[in-house]
Amino acid sequence: MKRYPGTIALICGSPKQTGSSSAAVLDRLREKLPEKTPITDIHIAAKLTAENAELLKSCDTLLFAFPLYVDGIPGHLLRALMQLEPLMRSEQRVYGIINCGFFEGRQCQTAARILENWAARSSCNYMGAIGLGTGGMLTLFDKYGEGPLKPIETRLTALVADIISGQTIGFEHTQASLPKIVYKLAVEMNWRRSAKRNGLKSADLKRKPLPPSRQ
Ligand SMILES: Cc1cc2nc3c(=O)[nH]c(=O)nc-3n(C[C@H](O)[C@H](O)[C@H](O)COP(=O)(O)O)c2cc1C
């Protein structure tokens, strides 16, 4: 009988060095794994290093957590996946956790399909992915884990059970439980604060790049 999940790689694919939602979700998931699970933590923030490629080769289960960028996978992570392609082994299992800034977790489905196609090309086992909306709130588990983030907590708990029993999950999605308008207003307020911290005005957030003819 096969042993699941073996050594599990928790791979953060956010380019942010600290404070990313992807890292926060992985931290939460790590707490739910059985105590003695062998874990390899990897952060792919830019290029895939030779050292990380070696580590990933030796893991049994690879869990990629990353942000949605333009309905797809961030460019640096896609490049890293392409580098990994020839190194993957047929017994390795791949899961994804994709988080997005939009309210609805189902926005992440296209990125999940990209990951699935990559796994097919790499001849490893694609086990499925979850799409998490309301990404702007996912660093707030300590505050809202028992409140609006409860659906995400529940989904992560189920994902851990699936990883441990070697279940495939297809694509499942969820988001925080709060009215969409409240999330939108909170996120927009954060953008204005962030603009101010960076010496910009709220109006600057609406600026558009000039078309090439007017540059
Ligand atoms: C270049 C870029 C493109 C993005 N594209 C999308 C998108 O298509 N849909 C979406 O819902 N959010 C999009 N976002 C928002 C991120 O997915 C969101 O902020 C996410 O929570 C960031 O996760 P992280 O903190 O793990 O990096 C984009 C962000 C950036 C910087």
Image (cartoon, rainbow, N blue to C red):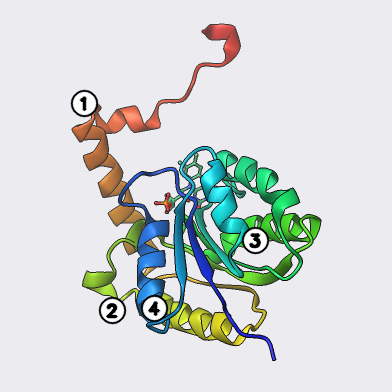
Check disc 4: other Cα within 10 Å, few if <14, some if 14-19, many if 20+. Answer: many
Point 80% across, 55% down: residue: 121
Considering depth in this image, is 164 or 171 the residue closer to the camera? 164
Residue annotated with mark 2? 147
Check disc 2: other Cα within 10 Å, few if <14, some if 14-19, many if 20+. Answer: some
- In the image, taking residue 77 as reference, residue 12 lies left or right, namely left
Q: Label 1 to label 2, Cα distance in Å?
A: 34 Å
The quadrant holding residue 207 is top left
Q: Quick one: label 3 or label 2, which is nearer the N terminus?
A: 3
Check disc 1: other Cα within 10 Å, few if <14, some if 14-19, many if 20+. Answer: few
Considering depth in this image, is 197 or 54 the residue closer to the camera? 54
Q: Which mark is residue 112?
A: 3
Q: Position of residue 174 (x, y in %)?
A: 50, 73
Q: Label 3 to label 2, Cα distance in Å?
A: 27 Å
Q: Quick one: label 1 or label 2, which is nearer the N terminus?
A: 2
Q: Is disc 4 in contact with disc 1, using a CB cutoff of under 8 Å?
A: no
User: Dividing the image into 4 quarters, which one contains the N terminus?
Assistant: bottom right
Residue annotated with mark 1? 199
